[in-house]
Amino acid sequence: MTAQFREKLIYEEQRLSMCTNPLGSYFAIGGDRPPFSCGCTALWRGYVGTWEIVDGRLYLVELHGELEDGRTASVATIFPDFPERVFAHWYSGTIRIPQGRMLEYVHMGYGSVYEQDLLLEINRGVLQRTHVHRNGQSQNDGPEGYEIGGMTVPAHGTQDRGDAP
Amino acid sequence: MIYFYWYLGVGTAVVTIMLAYARLARKDDDCSATSPALIERKSLERRFLNEAAILTTAVLFWPLVALLPVLDRHYRAESEDRNREFAVTRKDLQAALSIQEIEAREMVFDPLGAVPNVPFGHLNAEWVRFIEGVRTEDRLWSFSSHWTKCGHKRLLQGYVIVRGEEIGDYCLTVMKYIEDEASSGKVGRDRKIRTDLPAWLRRQAD
């Protein structure tokens, strides 16, 4: 497995990296999942969502992805009647926002460890409490923030589209 | 050299026991064992040489052969766990409710209007599909269950159809990963990194 691209979160006017996939819960509970195309091994879920917390409530505000038939996916693909903003009432769990320098790189999912994690506990789309979990202090002067080490992008052969070789 | 003879002796005993167990455990309707139509016709000499070669190899490498049933059991258990599906049990049931009571409970409100004004909000279609399967004699119950699969513990809540003594289809309202008690509280003292953040939270990704 490869380290995954993160979701994005707008929280307290900051754009943060979010190592949680609230849409995964939506699909698991019973929401219809469109046939996303997996463009690379660092994006198995096939989309990147942007979320926002407004007045303590979690919303999906953007989505970028591609479907298997080549069409672009957006929020409207999943929620056609709410293309601008979707209240994530289905989501209960903990949103993890890694902060600080990387302590340990793990090439799997969201496994990398950072100096601290900002944790937002959400119950049915409503923010319940926040707390910070400290993991340690980096001895290096590396960059701050979440990043992935590498990925594999499958080649798209011309034969797939019927083009002449 | 004596140790090598002991090694071969133990190996012979182990392989003999495993072969005897395999023959006893073989089912009567195992077609591959008896059907002449499925067995390739080889000369007696060739079959004897094949089996002698296999048995000799098994005796020489009997520790690895002895490990095979253990590994098989382990990976079969893992595979069964991966394929296990969630099912509501009697101990998960909480309260009997009518469809109207459930729909009143599950109306979702949002000040920004980012959710439809119907029961279960964005999951209304799933609810409609669920109640299409409800018969007049059925009862609906709310449920709450802790379920572990592939080492990840989840809280699952929702509503389930109870038909007489049988527990049937369910509709989820909450699916939440919860902390695994075994993986919390660990501190990596040997490495300067604290690892007491649960593994499910660190690796949570689709």
Image (spheres, coloured by chain):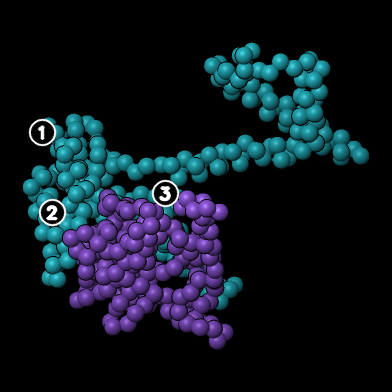
Chain colours: A purple, B cyan
At horizontal 46% and vertical 75% (from top left) the residue drawn is A146
Q: Quadrant of the C terminus of chain B?
A: bottom left
Left or right of residue A54, residue A73 in this image = right
Task: Point out the tag, 3 or 1, that comes first from the N-terminus.
Answer: 1
Mark 2 and mark 1 on one chain: yes
Most distant residue in the top direction: B36
Asked if residue A93 can be seen in this view, the reply is no
Q: Residue type at mark 2?
A: Pro
At horizontal 90% and vertical 38% (from top left) the residue drawn is B2
- Kindly state the secondary structure of the residue where label 2 is placed: loop
Q: Residue type at mark 3?
A: Lys
Label 2: chain letter: B
Q: Nearer the viewer, mark 3 or mark 1?
A: 1
Task: Point out the tag, 2 or 1, that comes first from the N-terminus.
Answer: 2
Q: How many angstroms separate mark 2 from mark 1 (CA)?
A: 21 Å
Q: How many angstroms separate mark 3 from mark 2 (CA)?
A: 30 Å
Residue A26: x and y in percent read: 29, 56
Most distant residue in the bottom direction: A141
Task: Tell me if label 3 and label 1 are in contact, CB under 8 Å.
Answer: no
Q: How many angstroms separate mark 3 from mark 1 (CA)?
A: 34 Å
The residue that disc 2 covers is B119
The residue that disc 1 covers is B136
The residue that disc 3 covers is B149
At horizontal 25% and vertical 74% (from top left) the residue drawn is A53
- Kindly state the secondary structure of the residue where label 1 is placed: loop
Q: How many marks?
A: 3
Q: Residue type at mark 1?
A: Thr
Left or right of residue B191, residue B45 in this image = right
Picture quadrant where residue B119 is located: bottom left
Is A105 or B18 nearer to us in this picture?
A105
Is A51 or A82 nearer to us in this picture?
A82
Label 1: chain letter: B
